[in-house]
Structures are given as C-alpha cells and as structure tokens.
Image: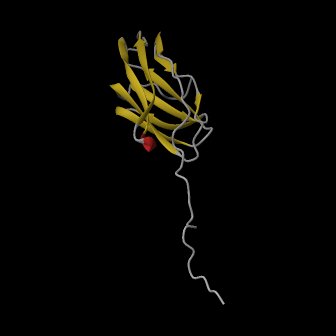
C-alpha cells in the first residue's frame, strides 16, 4: 500500500493583492469669496482588491484657517489643519473627494496637490493645483460668535 505524506508542487498559490487603482483625473480648483472654498470632483476608486491608503500632499501647508477635508463615500474621513499631508484608506468602489477652505481674510492660498498611493510604493495617482482667495469675511475676527442663533 502506498502512503503519501507530502505532495510536492501543490502548495497554495495566492496571487498578490491588486493595490493599483484605475487611473483618475482631478482638475485644478480655484475659488474667490468671503471665505474661499472649493471641492474636487468626486472620484470612484476602482480596480483594486485590497484596501489602499492614499496621501494628499500639498506644497503649501494647512493651518486652522486653511483646511482640507477628506470625504470617503460622502462621510468625513479626516480633516487636515496642520502640516502638508492628509491620508485616507479606501476599498474598491468607494468614492473620494476633498474640500479645500481658506478662511484667512484677504489672503490667497495656492499651490500644488499630489495624490499618491502609499500602499503601492507611493505611486502618483493625480496632481492638480489649487488657488483659493479669501476676499475678507468682514467680521474683523472680533469677539464671541459661535453660539446659538438669535
């Protein structure tokens, strides 16, 4: 009687996860107003079969008055208020968009934003410019505010 104790060449073969999303395009954004705010077009991340972490890197730093909100499937996934990067993790078919806000009176916040895939060796997915000019909120930044409406 033949007794097999080990089969050779039949090892489990799992393919590497696909972490390279299909190409996306993000157009340049600009806005001017009392508080300048602009949103990139919503993009759907497709072509992956594992979660990926995407990093948005700005050439001009964020601050409490110059923020970037990251939205995943319409829900706030993170807010950048300092530094120059913001990360968000997504899976296949999830949507992503960013909202840029410049609330610093009488200033322009502009630069280049680059979206890279940290999960795929920092591959660049998109690059675009932003230009947000706050023309002045007229409030002068003085006292109070933030309470219940009258």
Residue at the (45%, 35%) spot, across then down: 79
Quadrant of residue 142 within the rendered picture = top left
Decide which of 59, 38 is in the foreground and name it. Answer: 59
Residue at the (56%, 24%) spot, across then down: 149
Decide which of 10, 67 is in the foreground and name it. Answer: 10
Q: Is residue 145 above or below residue 8?
A: above
Decide which of 55, 35 is in the foreground and name it. Answer: 55
Asked whether residue 143 is in view, the answer is no
Asked whether residue 30 is in view, the answer is yes
Q: Position of residue 59 (x, y in %)?
A: 33, 24
Query: Is residue 124 left or right of 5 when viewed as pictured?
Result: left
In the image as oriented, which residue stretches furthest toward the bottom? 1
Q: Position of residue 98 (x, y in %)?
A: 50, 28
In the image as oriented, which residue stretches furthest toward the right? 1
Q: Quadrant of the N terminus?
A: bottom right
Q: Position of residue 42 (x, y in %)?
A: 58, 26
The number of numbered discs placed on residues in the rendered structure image is 0
Decide which of 28, 62 is in the foreground and name it. Answer: 28
Quadrant of residue 76 within the rendered picture = top right
Q: Position of residue 145 (x, y in %)?
A: 45, 24
Residue at the (42%, 15%) spot, across then down: 132
Q: Quadrant of the C terminus?
A: top right
């Amino acid at each position: 009687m033949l007794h097999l104790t080990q089969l050779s060449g039949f090892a489990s073969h799992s393919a590497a996860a696909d972490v390279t999303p299909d190409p996306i395009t993000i157009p340049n954004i600009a806005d001017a107003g009392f508080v300048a705010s602009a949103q990139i077009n919503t993009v759907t991340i497709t072509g992956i079969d594992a979660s990926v972490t995407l990093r948005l890197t700005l050439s001009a730093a964020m601050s409490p008055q110059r923020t970037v909100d990251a939205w995943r499937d319409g829900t706030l996934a993170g807010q950048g208020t300092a530094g120059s990067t913001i990360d968000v993790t997504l899976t296949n078919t999830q949507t992503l968009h960013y909202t840029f806000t410049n609330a610093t009176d009488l200033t322009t916040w502009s630069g280049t934003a680059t979206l890279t895939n940290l999960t795929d060796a920092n591959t660049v997915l998109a690059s675009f410019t932003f230009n947000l000019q706050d023309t002045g909120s007229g409030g002068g930044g003085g006292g109070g505010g933030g309470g219940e409406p009258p």
